[in-house]
């Protein structure tokens, strides 16, 4: 058993001191900013929103084509006096000026000249010529480069003790680190990999170039090493962190997708520098995007892509056209006339023979290369050690003996039956199975009694569609089966493109609801559940909005019935028996028939503790029903009340209701009128959020109300910071203070104000931004692997811990598998998929610490140990029926409740919402 884990995280080395470098900086300048803004306003037209130049494309062009440039600042388009370009040395004006001029001329491509008559068109052209002349004058006299000392470790310590980096370091530091590492080749087992820098929105990437090759099934597949660098904060840490993650980047060279279905793919371009003097090739790959352009009827570059401008800078070489990239991707990734381009693979582009991910040994070697390249300015964050040996709750033992397996299965079925009886609370359960294939119907009927340990059941006379019934131990289950027929058919969405798709989709849902109402009765004094066999997502690939799943869920909820879906056997992976089992287990979860196993933390946890979890469901206009939505979901679990004691907060009724009742209310309460939907849609398009401050204030008020409702007994409140901090900004790392809670602009208050026995634990995952570091376990002797447990730094009053789980038994790969440099005995290694369990950060924000008890005048109460509450949170990830969960069970239940948040645009007129581009 490993006793130590290592994270791929780095911080300032105090022995080295501040990392200060003399850097050259250029501003955008007032004159150039004004000229560019005037041009953009003429093109865009007048608007109520502040004018901000669309410099994303220009910044990418400068980073790629200006030798010596390191990074571009984020806010230079808004503040012309702020630093804009950062460089190792001044970039000549003869290089910067043509790049700016080419970009400015490119803005005019989007100007609609055809809508004007001859005289007006001439006036417009004359005005643009004048503006371009002003821009040429401005770029001929650019602001001078000036020398500036940049502290790459500059930070501010917040009142809560968290180090926050200077704002510009979130982009500048990853770029600087990437450039530093790219200058050092990676050597491993006789193989050398070179890296190129790729700028990203949240950091920087290193991609090994040229790509590696893997021969499989008479085809060549291409892949590269990927190193991602981001800057983050950690609650209460006195130094901010640099996270460096490693993985595989696969390149798409065998595409299986219709052009019309290509909604966006990233292309990295390796192009030579066009300047006669200086280096012939830079150290970057240039990011671009291609997608099908419906107005042109072909695949084209997206507007922000620098590739649109490169042919104007370099008239000698032939740059790839998007259509050529799709027809001959392998030729371009190998290079033509000194230019190479690779399409980044995603599953929508077809299959790929190279598996994703790296195993621990290879990641550890890459991590050691990174560590060496960052010395002496940055050091690795100290390794974390176990804080407990109680890694799991009281789970049923897993043994190899057949007899013991039978006993374990009997205990599992008994536990499920008791949980189901507790959730049903004496009411019968009425189940309708709507099937498309007889084998699915039969397997579902067989799996139900097996899971809850009942006899095969009794079927009424009358043929295969007669009802089945099971009665035992307070359970009364009645199952009816019938063909799904037209209920599971694709939705027919009106084709009138003059109206928003949200409105047309709502009409299609209404039609399906009416059809379901004709076939399905509303349950009376029973719990209702409908299991429907539907086609997989691939069947609706051409038109995803014809998928009837969400419409059926809304229709069933309006009839007072929960819904669960199982895919047609032709569209699903895995055995039908396995899928039938999971269909029922998820149905039990929706009924609230699930409870956390008894913990094994110790006497420091109150016996009458209740769990509460918060989850914010957020949809943009591209959500499942094309309607934006925000809904706070709260779930409460009381283990001491026995199995099935899962409730959710009904905000309209201001009371806790059984979990299945919460789900039904979510599906029927979120219809939006036309005005509300239009306002949310326009706000989401402009990036202003949803109706200003109102949702944030409303969510915070709901949370305060919930805390008041929970104060009657010891409570552990669980929240995910990445999910909640947008509506509860005081959950930002820099705003956290130990044993305090804050809302809005009011001062922080002691935790005891919201409940004398309240504890608050925050969890954090990667959140799509590498917010938590990668990790691997090691023994200090070169062996690397995985380990489950709770880990922490050896620091007094530590509040931040790591929760990890082991690799599931379904992913038995050797920990020493090498994919980037496969050995002679591991030639097929690149084809293996490497599954790496993610680290879950656990922060004990509030507990009954010595300081909190002293402030509350409760000196007679023993103080909490934060490690015990972190261990409890970790143990909540385990359950006998599931592989380890990504988050604690109460949070898992709150998040899955979001599947029932399905707002519809009701009562909308053709002008209520902005029409969508098809």
Image (cartoon, rainbow, N blue to C red):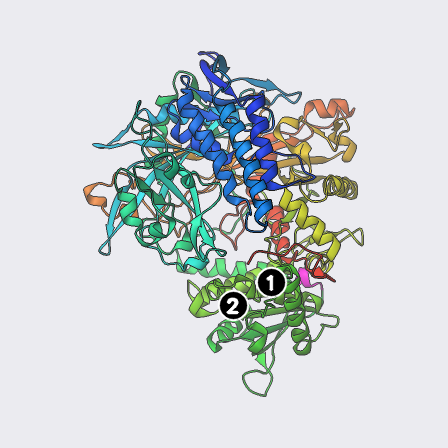
In the rendered view, tell whether residue 651 sits above or below residue 150.
Answer: below
- Using residue 117 as the reference point, say whether residue 678 is left or right of it: right
Residue 179: within the magenta? no
Q: Can you see residue 53? A: yes
- Using residue 347 as the reference point, say whether residue 732 is left or right of it: right
Q: Residue drawn at (52%, 40%), measured in percent from left and top? A: 108
The front one of 166 and 127 is: 127
Q: Quadrant of the N terminus?
A: top left
- Residue 497 - label: 1
Q: Position of residue 839 (x, y in %)?
A: 49, 38
What segment carries the magenta color?
Answer: 421-425
- Residue 450 - label: 2
- Residue 274 - label: none
The front one of 91 and 243 is: 91
In the rendered view, tell whether residue 419 sits above or below residue 782.
Answer: below
Neighbours of disc 2 within 10 Å: few (<14), some (14-19), many (20+): some
């Amino acid at each position: 058993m490993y006793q130590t884990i290592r994270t791929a995280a780095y911080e300032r080395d105090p022995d080295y001191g501040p990392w200060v470098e003399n850097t050259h900086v250029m501003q955008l300048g007032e004159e150039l900013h004004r000229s560019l803004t005037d041009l953009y306003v003429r093109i865009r037209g007048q608007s109520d929103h502040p004018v901000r130049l669309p410099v994303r494309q220009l910044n990418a062009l400068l980073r790629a084509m200006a030798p010596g440039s390191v990074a571009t600042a984020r806010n230079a388009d808004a503040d012309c006096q702020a630093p804009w370009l950062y460089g190792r040395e001044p970039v000549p004006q003869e290089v910067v000026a043509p790049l700016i001029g080419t970009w400015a001329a490119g803005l005019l491509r989007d100007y609609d000249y055809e809508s004007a008559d001859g005289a007006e068109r001439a006036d417009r052209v004359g005005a643009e010529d004048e503006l371009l002349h002003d821009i040429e004058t401005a770029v001929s006299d650019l602001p001078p480069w000036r020398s500036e000392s940049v502290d790459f470790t500059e930070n501010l310590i917040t009142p809560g003790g968290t180090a926050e980096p200077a704002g510009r370091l979130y982009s500048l530091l990853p770029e600087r680190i990437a450039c530093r590492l790219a200058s050092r080749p990676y050597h491993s087992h006789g193989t050398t990999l070179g890296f190129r820098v790729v700028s990203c929105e949240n950091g920087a990437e290193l991609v090994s170039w040229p790509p590696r090759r893997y021969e499989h099934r008479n085809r060549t597949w291409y892949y590269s090493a990927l190193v991602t660098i981001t800057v983050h904060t950690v609650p209460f840490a006195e130094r901010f962190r640099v996270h460096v993650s490693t993985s595989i980047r696969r390149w798409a060279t065998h595409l299986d997708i219709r052009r019309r279905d290509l909604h966006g793919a990233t292309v990295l371009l390796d192009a030579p520098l066009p300047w006669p003097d200086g280096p012939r090739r830079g150290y970057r790959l240039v990011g671009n995007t291609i997608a099908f352009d419906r107005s042109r009827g072909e695949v084209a570059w997206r507007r922000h892509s620098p590739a649109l401008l490169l042919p104007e800078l370099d008239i000698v070489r032939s740059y790839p056209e998007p259509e050529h990239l799709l027809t001959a991707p392998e030729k371009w990734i190998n290079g033509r006339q000194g230019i190479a381009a690779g399409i980044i693979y995603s599953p929508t582009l077809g299959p790929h023979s190279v598996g994703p991910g790296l195993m621990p040994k290879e990641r550890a070697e890459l991590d050691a290369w990174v560590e060496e390249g960052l010395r002496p300015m940055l050091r690795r964050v100290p390794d974390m050690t176990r804080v407990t040996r109680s890694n799991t709750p009281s789970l049923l033992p897993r043994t190899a003996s057949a007899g013991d397996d039978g006993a374990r299965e009997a205990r599992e079925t008994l536990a499920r039956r008791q949980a189901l009886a507790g959730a049903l609370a004496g009411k019968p359960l009425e189940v309708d199975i709507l099937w498309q294939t007889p084998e699915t119907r039969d397997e579902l009927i067989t799996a139900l009694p097996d899971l809850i340990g009942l006899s095969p059941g009794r079927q009424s006379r009358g043929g295969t569609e007669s009802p089945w019934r099971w009665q035992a131990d307070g359970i009364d289950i009645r199952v009816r089966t019938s063909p799904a027929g037209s209920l599971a058919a694709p939705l027919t969405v009106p084709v009138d493109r003059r109206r928003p798709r949200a409105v047309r989709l709502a009409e299609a849902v209404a039609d399906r609801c009416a059809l379901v109402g004709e076939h399905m009765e509303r349950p009376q004094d029973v719990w209702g559940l409908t299991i429907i066999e539907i086609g997989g997502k691939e069947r609706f690939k051409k038109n995803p909005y014809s998928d009837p799943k969400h419409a059926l869920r809304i229709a069933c909820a309006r009839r007072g019935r929960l819904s669960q879906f199982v895919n047609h056997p032709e569209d699903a992976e895995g055995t039908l028996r396995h899928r039938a089992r999971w269909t029922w287990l998820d149905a039990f979860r929706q009924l609230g028939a699930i409870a956390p196993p008894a913990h094994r933390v110790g006497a420091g946890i109150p016996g009458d503790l209740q769990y509460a979890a918060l989850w914010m469901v957020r949809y943009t206009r591209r959500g499942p029903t094309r309607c934006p939505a925000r809904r706070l979901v709260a779930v409460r679990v009381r283990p001491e009340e026995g199995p099935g004691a899962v409730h959710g907060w009904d905000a309209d009724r201001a009371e806790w209701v059984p979990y299945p009742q919460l789900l039904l209310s979510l599906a029927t309460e979120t219809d939006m009128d036309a005005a509300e939907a239009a306002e949310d849609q326009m706000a989401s398009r402009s990036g202003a959020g949803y109706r200003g401050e109102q949702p944030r204030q409303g969510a915070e008020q709901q949370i305060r109300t919930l805390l008041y409702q929970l104060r009657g007994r010891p409570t552990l409140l669980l929240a995910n910071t990445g999910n909640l901090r947008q509506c509860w900004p005081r959950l930002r790392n820099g705003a956290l203070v130990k044993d305090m809670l804050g809302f809005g602009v009011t001062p922080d208050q002691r935790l005891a104000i919201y409940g004398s026995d309240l504890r608050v634990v925050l969890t954090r995952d990667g959140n799509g931004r590498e917010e938590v570091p990668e990790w691997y376990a090691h023994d200090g002797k070169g062996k690397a692997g995985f380990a489950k447990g709770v880990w922490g730094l050896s620091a007094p009053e530590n509040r931040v811990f790591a929760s990890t789980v082991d690799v599931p038994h379904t992913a038995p790969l050797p920990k020493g598998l090498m994919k980037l440099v496969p050995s002679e005995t591991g030639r097929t290694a690149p084809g293996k998929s490497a599954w790496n369990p993610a680290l879950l950060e656990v922060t004990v924000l509030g507990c009954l610490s010595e300081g909190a008890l002293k402030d509350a005048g409760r000196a007679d109460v023993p103080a909490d140990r934060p490690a015990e509450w972190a261990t409890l949170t970790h143990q909540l990830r385990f359950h006998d029926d599931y592989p380890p969960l990504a988050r604690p069970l109460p949070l898992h239940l709150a998040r899955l409740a979001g599947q029932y948040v399905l707002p519809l645009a009701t009562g909308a007129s053709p002008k209520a919402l902005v029409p969508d581009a098809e």
